[in-house]
Image: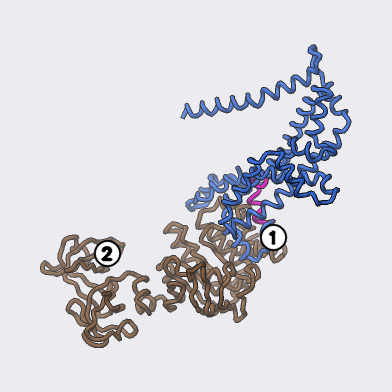
Amino acid sequence: MIRNRTFRYVTLIILGLYVVIPMYASVQFSLESGYHSSLTFNAYTSGIDQPGLGSSVVTSLEVSFGAVAATLLLLVPTIIFVHLRLPGLRTWLEAVSLLPLGIPAIVTVVGTLGVYNSAPNWFINSPMILALLYVVLALPYSYRAIDSGVRSIDLHTLVEAGRSMGARWWVLFRRVLFPNLRSGVLAAAFLTLALSLGEYTFASLILPSTPTFPVWLAGVVTTSTYYAVALSVVALIVTWGLLVAISVVGSGRQRFAGGAAQREAEAGEKIDLTLAPQALDTVA
Amino acid sequence: MTATLPTSQRVERVGKNLSLELVDARRSFDKVKALDGLSIALAPGEFVALLGPSGCGKTTALRAVAGLEQLDSGAVLVGGSDITRLPPHRRHLGMVFQAYSLFPNMNALDNVAFGLEVRKVPAAERRTRAAELLELVGLTGMGQRFAHELSGGQQQRVALARALCAEPDLLLLDEPLSALDAKVRHQLRDEIRRIQLELGITTLFVTHDQEEALSMADRVGVMRNGRLEQLAPPADVYSRPATDFVAQFVGSVSRLPGRVVAPGRVDVMGSVLSVPPNAGAGLPAGADVDVLVRPESVQLRPSPSGGAVIARSSFLGATVRVVATLPGGIEVSSTLPAGEAMSLFPGARADVELAEDILFVVPRPD
């Protein structure tokens, strides 16, 4: 028991150092800004004044939230439908969702441009095309997040119970399915958002005329490394902030996830714990 | 928030007293016929249990009524109206499932009120109504609890209240007690029957538990291979089975070798007994048969020269089930009062006597 706990702490500390040391170095580097005498926010103030920052951030946010919306609109109904009506296809879907991990970025880009060759210019040159591409890119992670959420509930029974009580599909989805799939949906949204905000290769190849923040940042590196590092730190904090905000907004379930043990005595009847792990899964 | 209507008014508000008919219902899954021309009719306010082994089609029949399975052919009629092609959400039926089916994101009160919510009943009215139903199922004051804060029995009570809240035309129960432990199952069994009688709602109940079916239902339908073998009051299903399958599936039986000595008369273990009509009485004289008898029709009396040897006994409370082995290795079961069974210990010899009520006679397989 003690050995297990020690192992956990050691692992956590090593992992923490692995993440914290580069971040600390980045912050230190950006605050020194080459003067080596005192710490200053010059890199931050000057970096924010760089031309093109605002538009690149807007483009990144458009692309990222577009990708999140498209991912959820596409995957949530599809995965629910497959679980309900075509369970035999689940293995195939899982395999297909892994494909983006094995296909080189340049192949995907060339393939995408080929597919959209006949599409109108306004579409090819808009951030929308990048958002759709990020849906595919995030598929290995978003698919699993939503799929595990769907597996953690008794989908068939909930759907049949709701339908038998007169609920149309839309009502059922809004009042029953989405609230119970919230953790999986949020996880998919996190992963897609984080991936979309930081992606460089596809953005630089497909949307060179409307740079996203990472593409713009790569250009700033040629002007000043300090600015680029300072802005990277800011981007990291903003991304974290966005993820935390989504998490707080979407984690309403946690308020009713506890308290079973305390109320067991009041119930006057043996508490059946079979649902408890499921509830915890959903919250986790 | 608390109930305001007396029970009698609730009865009027819920009991729709509509009939249910399944007419020549057929449904196949690949090459398996889940329903093979099933026809069954429930009178208004009647409680019918469908009983049968796994895969006999009883759940498919219930789901077809609910609209969760589409029939290949046949019809579902509720109150004389054909609802065969209606989607589930337009059938206006209440259903309780085998699995715990409460919506985890809603408390008990909101779960119960859900059927009214989708019908756009004003919030205050539906909460009052939901509280009434929670009171009906004995869960007053538990409306704020979520599914994971309720025991299995309580969850099924909430599910029952939820199924009844929107005043459905029918109540469908899909093995709602099978996940519960024995004590809670017994309690809830009685409560479901009480509530069904109180509300007078037509109810179709699916179970594989004979005791549940026999103790709760007005009539029991025994199914096999997608067909109805018998639909009759519980006492008739038990005492006057329509087929040898029903005789063997419901309750327990012993198979004893016999021979038909005259039409309607069979010699079994040296006693000539009458065969009830429709229980194999038409077999020709001289035919070798198996005679099916209930344990309570078999009497075992201690006797040092008896032909049977007691093999084992099981204590059942007021009674004891004693199994004896006859010459030839044939086993016969007898249910005896605990006092009478004391001297029938394993290894003891006993005489076997049969009462004059053979259950069924079937031709002995070659």
Q: Residue at x 71, y 61 (%)?
A: B123
Residue that numbered label 1 is attached to: A171
Q: Nearer the viewer, residue B278 or B333?
A: B278
What is the magenta range? A174-186
Residue B200 position, x and y percent, is: 55, 75
Residue B266 position, x and y percent, is: 23, 82
In front: label 1 or label 2: 1
Q: Residue at x 57, y 68 (%)?
A: B69
- Apparent colour of chain A: blue
Q: Amino acid at mark 2?
A: Val
Q: Amino acid at mark 1?
A: Val
Image position of B193 (left or right of A13): left
Residue that numbered label 2 is attached to: B320
Q: Residue at the top extreme?
A: A37
For the question of whether residue A167 can be seen, the reply is yes
Q: Secondary structure at mark 2?
A: strand
Residue A53 position, x and y percent, is: 85, 33
- Apparent colour of chain B: brown
Dividing the picture into quarters, in which one does residue B343 lie? bottom left
| As drawn, B94 above or below A41 | below
What is the chain letter for disc 2?
Answer: B
How many discs appear?
A: 2
- 10 Å crowding of disc 1: few (<14), some (14-19), many (20+): some
Q: Quadrant of the C terminus of chain A?
A: top right
